[in-house]
Image: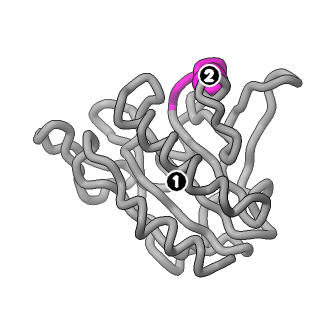
Amino acid sequence: MGRHGAVTFKGNPLTLAGEELRVGSVAPDFDLVAYGPTGMTHVTKADLLGKPAFISVVPSLDTPVCQVQTRTFNGRLAALGDKVTALTVSLDLPFAMNRFCGAEDIKAMRNGSDYMDRSFGEKWGVLIDELKILARAVFVLDAKGVVQYAQVVNEVASEPDYDAAIAALEKLV
């Protein structure tokens, strides 16, 4: 497992595991777990291909900033309808993610948990090594799965650049 760069959490420096994912890179494969009406299901990169994809990564939906990020992107993505696929990724258990998204009426975004093996976090360069949680990040992929926008938020307790992320996605629609 490689290491790259650092983020801070409330000012404390932390290390990101894995390789940094840059614009122009082919997005790595992943296998996340979701819980819904049919029980446990898997969400993979293949599920996102064929149209532009938006991936919002949060440390935990049980924290205020992650909740704001998810609500904000859900509201902004709703206007794009089925022209895009959208996904929230965290290490929260699939049951907790489903509960939050149901209670908050999050319908424009699917959710996927990396709790099984944290491989999304490592492959996408967003696993905080010291805490074993995901950093806050946003990725936009084109229909073929090539990264067109990537932001790993420097301070985990801060919100992402909503306008830049949505603008990058809208260029692909």
Report crowding for label 1: few under 14, some 14 to 19, many 20 or more residues within 10 A (C-alpha). Answer: many
In the image, 13: left or right of 71?
A: left
Residue drawn 55% across the image and 46% down it: 120
Residue drawn 59% across the image and 81% down it: 171
Find residue 71 and report its horizontal and vertical position in percent: 51, 40
Main SS, magenta region, reads helix
In the image, 125: left or right of 147?
A: left
Q: Examine the structure image and report whether residue 93 is included in the region drawn in magenta.
A: yes
In the image, 150: left or right of 30?
A: left
Find residue 30 and report its horizontal and vertical position in percent: 66, 50
Q: Nearer the viewer, residue 119 or 84?
A: 84
Give the structural element (helix, strand or loop) at label 1. Answer: helix
Find residue 144 and report its horizontal and vertical position in percent: 73, 75
In the image, 90: left or right of 131?
A: right
Whether residue 25 is situated above or below residue 166 in the rendered picture: below
The range drawn in magenta is 91-100
Find residue 68 and report its horizontal and vertical position in percent: 42, 38
Colour pattern: one colour
Tag 1 residue: 123
Tag 2 residue: 103
The reply to whether callout 2 and callout 1 are in contact (CB within 8 Å) is no
Q: Amino acid at mark 2?
A: Ala
Q: Which mark is residue 74?
A: none
Label 2 to label 1, Cα distance in Å? 30 Å
